[in-house]
Image (cartoon, grey):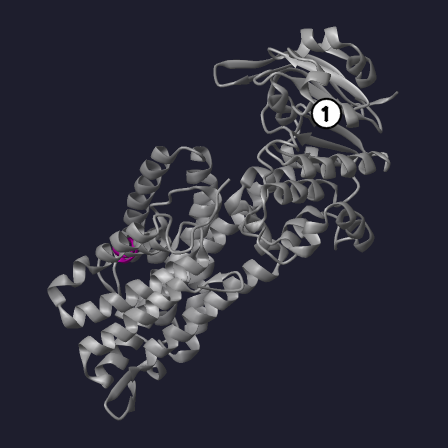
Amino acid sequence: MKIGRFDLIPILLVVAVTAGAAGLIGSASTWVTLTVAGLAMGLLIFIMASGLTLVFGLMDVMNFAHGLFIAVGAYVAASVMKAFGGTLGALAPAILGAMLVAGVLGLFFERIIIRPVYGQHLKQILITTGGMIVAEQLIHVLWGPDLLPLPRPEALRGAFLFGDIVLERYRITAVALGLLVFVGLVLVLNRTRLGLLIRAGVENKEMVEAMGYRIGLLFVGVFVAGSALAGLGGALWGMYQEAVTVAIGAQMMVLIFIVIIIGGLGSVTGCFVGALLVGLVANYVGYLSPKVALGSNILIMVLVLLWRPQGLYPVGKA
Amino acid sequence: MFPVLELKGVNTHIGRYHILQGVDFSVPKNQLTMLLGRNGAGKTTCLRTIMGLWRASAGQILFEGRDLGKQPTRAIANLGIGYVPESMGIFAGLTVRENLVLAARSGPLDEARLDWIFRYFEALKRFWDLPAGNLSGGQKQMLAIARAIIEPRKLVLVDEPTKGLAPAIIQNLVEAFAELKKTDTTILMVEQNFHAARALGDSVAVMDSGRIVHAGSMKDLAADEALQNRLLGLSLEAHQ
């Protein structure tokens, strides 16, 4: 089923999961609360994963250190929030600081760690995993080994109440920010020449270069943007948990890999739909059968890959 | 005739394989030069080496007198060289329009040139906003060629444009290239379809085992059946 060029079936799958959960949960207020929580979780994962899926698709780089940028973003946000007294006014500098530091770190990481191992997957896995371990120790040196509090600003605490329905303010904010990032990415990828180049590069790097474009520069730009998005995701996820540890990025990596694999490597839309699916199912299953919750995402990945082995929105590669 | 492109003793290694073993030939300005040869002779490697997609291990590639040897692929393309690879290299997820927009490096699409292209490749107009992956094989080839000539180029490298296409579409492509020749575009084309090669070629270079074994005019080769048999293993007449 398609609207124009767009394949609707994965979207309908998300709708079906949501509708199916409504039947199983029974209570409408609980279902709404869980759905908003699932969407918030999913969209935060999307923000963290969207950069990695582009890096994977365009550069064919297996960056196991992506979690590092998430962790650094969270730590920078915690430091800025603390410095500015944790007010709502500190939110923008915290988020921008997290993106800036993660982006700059991404630039150095691509130049020094990734560049020498382009096209060598095994070395990429080893060196990025090693880089992540070293960087985590550096975070310990800079911020100390203890858990760092990252309280939300007062204005984002509490919840809206609609009868029995409880909607946390921060979750609503996370949903809005996640949608903003998705719409922004879709607009850039579909309405700008840069976006066309990125999409073309994901399909066939060689041809992009044979048309006279600097694919190397495109690689760096996408890596830096992906790192900055991971930093943003780290800052938001840290506030979601109200605490930051050095493992915050590494802990998210399993979910991020699941999301980009089921979405289709290199597909931002696939990453978005995959993240919603993972976020919603994690919350529904966590409520209905907590013991199964841990394995639910793996189960989704298995089922999706049995159905569509290239992911929900496969990207054609030359 | 002044050569736009000259290859002098070009060698190319791919891994441990020595593919081009001292290739020498030139492509005269404003002519269509056919690069012929049996499968595995090194024709595609030759085009890829010119584009810098594989590096020459020895020898010189001169474009308008400038050595392309150490230039990156993008710089070679920006000298005014269009490339249509054997795989066509279209971006399947992008629309026909988006494919052409990316190929037009100097700015917005030139409407007059676009109309000229549509005269020969009408399907591209019809499927303008459709993903290129939905096109048929012949239409994809049309798009790949249109992309290479969407702006005037000094040299266009085309690798087996008629491969796997129906005769009616091949005829369409032959007409389009015949028209392109009238615009003073220099073309170097690898081709296995001898009928198309004879219809279009001004000059010809024949490769075998990584070397040029014959160079001259297409007219002379087309007239000499014994030479065709010796160089290509069959005659042009027999192939039709």
| Residue sticking out furthest to the bottom | A163
A250 falls in the magenta region: yes
Name the spot of residue B95 as percent of width and height, x first: 60, 54
Write down the residue under mark 1.
B195
Name the spot of residue B11 as percent of width and height, x first: 62, 14
Residue at image position (30%, 40%) is A130
Residue A212 seen in render: no
Q: Amino acid at mark 1?
A: His
Name the spot of residue A218 as percent of width and height, x first: 56, 47
Name the spot of residue A148 as percent of width and height, x first: 26, 64
Q: Quadrant of the C terminus of chain B?
A: top right
Relative placement, left or right, of A227 versus A136 is right
Q: Secondary structure at mark 1?
A: helix
Residue at image position (62%, 35%) is B165
Please report the bounds of the magenta region as a residue range. Answer: A248-253
In the figure, residue A215 lies in which quadrant? top right
Above/below status of A48 relative to A17: above
Magenta stretch, main secondary structure class:
helix
A121 falls in the magenta region: no
Camera-nearest residue between A259 and B40: B40
